[in-house]
Every structure is written in structure tokens, then in C-alpha cells.
Image (spheres, helix red, strand yellow):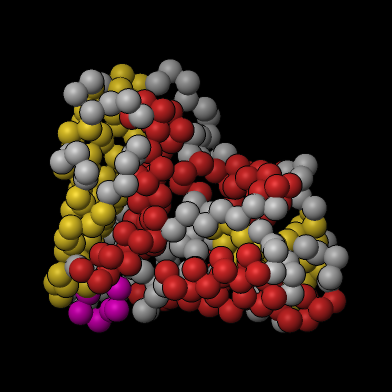
């Protein structure tokens, strides 16, 4: 299937382009970008022009930040194209609902992707937790913003979500592996005095069976980077490490660790999209986004020292 990529930025170059190139299902047939292009692929700077001139391309993958994404997605759907959305699927929940309704109206597929759900050990964690009695679940997602988001001003602007940009990855795993839904009880947000979005956040969730469910996100982490979820149950403790790449049960590592366990995430997203198209389906699980919206609505804001890159 021919596909067009919109936004040739960090994630497009790191993941989307190599995953499409390596897939037997997909052929990258056009890019739309104000700055970038891909060797041997027709390059457009104007999205409307691409939609008009390349009517043969039925699928559009949007690799833009969340705020500009809605307009592109809505145009693509109105032009009868199927759409794949980077995470988070929009800047607001209402936008995402509107896109889903539009996709239904125009009978096209739309896929809100959550790449971290495709990390190697997430499915194993889900299977293990399915019949356990959860007592405590702690998410620790601490990374160095200067290392992972250099020069990305949009993450500090309204709609950029700040530390929830990586934090939503943890929430996408949490909502996938827990057999029940949780909802936010309270949140604390650390917002730099000179910025619009949080650099740190602590979230406390209600769990229907009374388990303690807490998430701690921080962008001020230097040294070791931590992307970990620990679940304490009556039957043992599960730990997902390195963003879902590794799993331990009671401290014992799963023997089956692949050489590059995160490398499968984006190839799996594109395989999922191919499958979705074959059934004409829609996949818009917005639960990770609900938690972020709730945290931004309910969170107590603490002004913290200004952030300068
Ligand atoms: P980025 O490099 O800062 O931006 C991606 C591209 O979006 C830019 O190159 C630009 O495309 C386009 N863009 C930016 N602002 C725009 C605007 N106002 N209007 C139109 N186009 C605009 O960001 P990224 O890191 O790739 O992130 C993009 C999305 O992927 C985000 O939602 C992020 O959460 C997600 N993501 C990122 C990572 C990561 O490691 N960075 C990992 C997973 C998911 P052109 O210059 O080509 O026009």
C-alpha cells in the first residue's frame, strides 16, 4: 500500500521512515514537509497539493506535534484518506472525538497509535496481571528533557503537554496491562515559571479494588534514565523496565530478551495499520489521553524554577 508521511521531524526520521522501508506492506510514496524530504520519494511542501495530485495514495501517516495535527487529519479524512496518528492523538479529547466521528462519516480507517504498547514485554505483562490481585502499582518515568527533546519548543507551549509527552507512553502501557480501568483522583504538576507545560507530575489514581496506583513523571532526571512500572500483587511482583523492553517477575528476568527490544514498536504499528485497513476498522483508544486531560484539569500547579535549554 502506498503511504504519505506528513512532518519529516525527529520521530519520522528515527522510526517511521525505516519501519515503512522495511515493511512488505508499505511503500513510502510521498512526504509533506516544510523542511525535509526522503531520497527517491516525491516531496511536497503543501498538504492540499499532495492530496490533490496524489489521489492514488490512500493512507496518510501524521508525524506532527499534537497541536497542528487536527487540521491535517480532518483534511485527509474529508479527502477520503485513511489516517494514522502519532501519539498523543490530538491536543484535546474533543478533537479526537471529532476525528473519529468524521472518519465514521467518511467510511475511512483511523488509528490512534500508542508505540509504547508495542514494546516487547507489554503483552507478557498484561497476560501475567490478568488473574492477579493488585495491591500497588507504581509508574516511574524519569528522563532528561535536554537529551530527548532538544530544541522542541512546542512541548512547552499550550497543547504540547510537557512531561506528559513521554508520560502518556507510560499511561498507554498502564491502560493496556491493567484488567480494569482506573481514574485520576489527584495530581501535582511542577510548571517552570517561564513555561506553559509541566516539567514534573505526580498522579494518584482510584482503582476499583482499592489498589494504590501512582505515577511519577520527571523531566529533570540526569544520569540513569528510568522508564519503569512496578506492580505488586498477592501472587508476586512484576516489573516492566526500560519502557516495556524488559520484564521481571519477583526480580527474575524473562530469559527471552531480544537484542533490540524497542525496535519492534513502529514496525508493529504499521502492521496493525495494515490489519485495520483490511477490516475497515477504527482504533481510537483515548484512555491514556483522558488521564492527561484529567491531570491538567485537576492538577495542583506548583511554580518551579525557570527552564532554559
Ligand atoms: P518534531 O521533530 O519537533 O516535529 C515533527 C515535525 O512536525 C517537524 O519536523 C515539522 O515538520 C512538523 N511541525 C512542527 N510544528 C508544526 C506546525 N506548527 N505546523 C505544521 N507542522 C509542524 O517532533 P517529533 O519529536 O518528531 O514528534 C512528533 C510527534 O511524535 C509528537 O506527537 C511526539 O509526541 C511523537 N513522538 C516523538 C518521539 C521522539 O522520540 N521524539 C517518540 C515517539 C513519538 P516539517 O519540518 O517536516 O514541516
Q: Residue at x 49, y 68 (%)?
A: 97
Q: Quadrant of residue 17?
A: bottom right
Q: Is residue 251 left or right of residue 135?
A: right
The quarter of the image holding the C terminus is bottom left
The spot of residue 205 in percent (x, y) is 21, 51
Q: Quadrant of residue 199?
A: bottom left
Which residue occupies the foreground of this view, 127 or 309? Answer: 127
Q: Is residue 204 visible?
A: yes
Q: Is residue 220 visible?
A: no
Q: Residue at x 44, y 73 (%)?
A: 94
The spot of residue 283 in percent (x, y) is 56, 53
Q: Quadrant of residue 76?
A: bottom right
The boundaries of the magenta stretch are: 192-197
Q: Main secondary structure of the magenta part?
A: loop
The spot of residue 293 in percent (x, y) is 32, 67
Position of residue 277 relative to residue 42, above or below, is: above
Position of residue 168 relative to residue 274, above or below, is: below
- Which residue lies most toward the front here? 105
- Please check the rendered image and state whether residue 196 is part of the magenta-colored stretch, yes or no: yes
Q: How many marks?
A: 0
Q: Is residue 119 left or right of residue 174?
A: right
Q: Residue at x 59, y 52 (%)?
A: 15
Which residue occupies the foreground of this view, 205 or 190? Answer: 205
Q: Residue at x 49, y 59 (%)?
A: 87
- Please check the rendered image and state whether residue 110 is part of the magenta-colored stretch, yes or no: no
The spot of residue 174 in percent (x, y) is 34, 45
Amino acid at each position: 500500500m502506498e503511504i504519505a508521511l506528513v512532518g519529516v521531524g525527529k520521530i519520522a526520521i528515527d522510526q517511521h521512515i525505516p519501519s515503512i522501508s522495511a515493511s512488505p506492506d508499505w511503500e513510502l510514496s510521498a512526504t509533506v514537509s516544510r523542511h525535509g524530504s526522503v531520497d527517491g520519494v516525491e516531496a511536497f511542501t503543501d498538504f492540499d497539493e499532495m492530496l490533490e495530485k496524489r489521489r492514488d495514495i490512500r493512507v496518510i501517516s501524521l508525524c506532527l506535534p499534537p497541536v497542528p495535527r487536527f487540521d491535517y487529519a480532518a483534511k485527509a479524512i474529508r479527502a477520503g484518506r485513511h489516517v494514522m496518528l502519532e501519539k498523543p492523538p490530538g491536543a484535546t479529547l474533543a478533537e479526537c472525538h471529532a476525528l473519529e466521528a468524521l472518519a465514521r462519516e467518511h467510511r475511512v480507517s483511523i488509528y490512534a497509535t500508542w508505540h509504547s504498547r508495542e514494546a516487547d514485554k507489554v503483552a507478557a505483562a498484561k497476560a501475567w496481571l490478568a488473574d492477579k490481585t493488585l495491591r500497588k502499582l507504581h509508574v516511574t518515568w524519569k528522563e532528561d528533557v535536554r537529551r530527548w527533546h532538544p530544541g522542541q519548543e512546542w512541548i512547552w507551549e499550550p497543547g504540547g503537554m510537557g512531561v506528559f509527552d513521554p508520560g502518556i507512553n507510560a499511561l498507554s502501557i498502564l491502560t493496556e496491562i491493567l484488567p480494569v480501568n482506573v481514574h485520576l483522583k489527584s495530581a501535582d504538576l511542577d510548571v517552570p515559571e517561564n513555561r506553559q507545560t509541566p516539567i514534573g507530575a505526580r498522579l494518584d489514581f482510584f482503582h476499583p479494588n482499592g489498589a494504590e496506583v501512582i505515577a511519577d513523571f520527571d523531566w529533570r532526571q540526569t544520569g540513569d534514565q528510568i522508564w519503569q512500572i512496578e506492580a505488586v500483587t498477592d501472587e508476586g511482583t512484576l516489573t516492566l523496565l526500560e519502557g516495556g523492553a524488559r520484564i521481571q517477575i519477583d526480580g527474575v528476568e524473562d530469559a527471552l530478551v531480544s537484542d533490540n527490544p524497542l525496535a519492534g514498536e513502529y514496525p508493529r504499528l504499521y502492521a496493525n495499520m495494515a490489519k485495520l485497513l483490511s477490516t475497515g476498522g477504527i482504533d481510537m483508544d483515548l484512555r491514556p489521553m483522558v488521564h492527561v486531560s484529567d491531570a491538567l484539569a485537576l492538577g495542583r500547579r506548583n511554580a518551579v524554577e525557570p527552564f532554559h535549554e
